[in-house]
Amino acid sequence: MYLCPEKEDKPQGSHTHPPPQKNIMHDLDKQINQRLEDLAKKENLRHLSLPYSSLGKWIVVNEEKRLNLSGNDYLGLTERDDLREQFAALHPNYSSPSGSTSSRLLLGNYEEATLFEEEIAKALEHPSALLFNSGYHLNTGILPALAHLEGVKVYADRMVHASIIDGIRLSRLPFTRFRHNDLEHLTELLKEDEGKYRISIVAVESLYSMDGDEADLEALVALKKKYSSLIIYCDEAHAIGTHGANGYGLAEEHGVLADIDILVGTFGKALNSMGAYAAISTSLREYLINMARPLIFSTMLPPAVIAWSRYIFALLPQLGEERAQLRQVSQYLRSSLQEKGYSCPGVAQILPLIIGENGACGLLAERLQKGGFEVKPIRYPTVALGTARLRLSLTAAITPADLDPMLQMLESLR
Ligand SMILES: *Cc1c(COP(=O)(O)O)cnc(C)c1O
């Protein structure tokens, strides 16, 4: 139970406003419980999932083994003991985890980090790169830092990740959101603002995690020719590792790596590590080292974690087979669901299985979980009303045979 016992609240007269509470903790509990009840009524109360242990593509919950269709381990690297062994052989000094004990600006500037940044910059065709502790640190660090410049406005796709929204909020920059993937709408907004701003930052993701669809990066880059104030800020969190001939993301796939001004991504998903990168200009790197508070005021990643990210990043060009397997199994699941009459838009390894109402979506998720499939319902207000969905995400380790029993269940429930 999450509710705390309610104490009786005795009114002390006939004030229009409630009198100040004497017992502060009591009021805190009361308000918290009220909010939690409201969330529960709207079927939006979140819980931590049951503790589980992971066996590659399987997880074990309550002694039940389930296929993990809710993770971001897109290349199936959690299964790869061979890679961990190779890493350990290459780096015997990193066999026991040890913290960096300091911010990057104090004593956390490990050689590993600097070398890695040079490699990222080269791979992603940018003059420089900068590491952050996580994608969340990065996205809440860059825009607030840029807010110290003059004449900046942000244009964000309506579906960008919460960390970008939080970055915008912290920055207190003027901003507008354009309809999801609607560059005509964006162009209208840019036209309205023409001449008003010196720096127009367009924030997008290359692959969106709720709809599994892609931004039109080539068209966005073409817009830069028309609007010289335009700066593209593109988050490749779900595409780094999985897309592009070398695994450098959708910007690589579309041949626009060097044209994305602020090209960012995380090591926490396909790369099976922790941390994030921004591929940027040399001056922006120096500026962020001075102005990005999540970088200045947080302990640097442990050197062993940086080394592991660096090891996997260097391996990306060789993981073409894994990328091909991921594409094939995604195509198999998407077309099988569509054949059974399900609505399943998107193009990549993230498949939104649209159900509609929050309640029905939650029930279906429970049934599939009991049947051995770890799927999570994504409900309003995370997504638009009436588009509650199961977000199925695949990995290179999952095969069509793993998915067939789920497809049979979905067929019988139709
Ligand atoms: C997951 C995600 C992040 C956050 O990255 P972390 O490294 O997990 O903090 C940022 N942006 C997008 C688009 C994401 O999907």
Image (cartoon, rainbow, N blue to C red):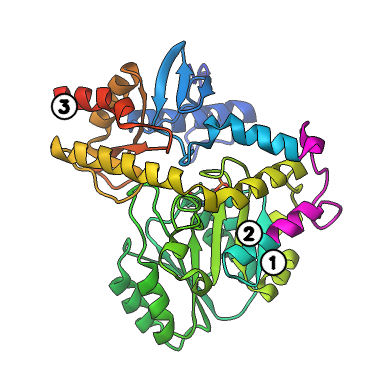
Three-letter amino acid code at disc 1? Leu
User: In this image, 334 relative to 103: left or right?
Assistant: left
Residue matched to label 1: 288
Q: Quick one: which residue is furthest to the right in this view? A: 107
**First in sequence: mark 1 or mark 2?**
2
Q: Does the magenta stretch include residue 135?
A: no
Instruction: Give me the C-alpha separation between circle 1 and circle 3.
Output: 52 Å
Q: Which residue is depicted at the point 28% across and 38% down?
A: 389
Q: Quick one: which residue is furthest to the top in this view? A: 63
**Which quadrant: the C terminus?**
top left
Three-letter amino acid code at disc 3? Glu
Query: What span is colored magenta in the figure?
Result: 91-117
**Nearest-to-viewer mark from 1 and 3:** 3
Q: Name the one closer to the observer, 175 or 71.
A: 71
Query: Exactly how many numbered labels are in the figure?
Result: 3
* Residue 411 circle label: 3
Examine the image and state in which quarter residue 195 appears: bottom left
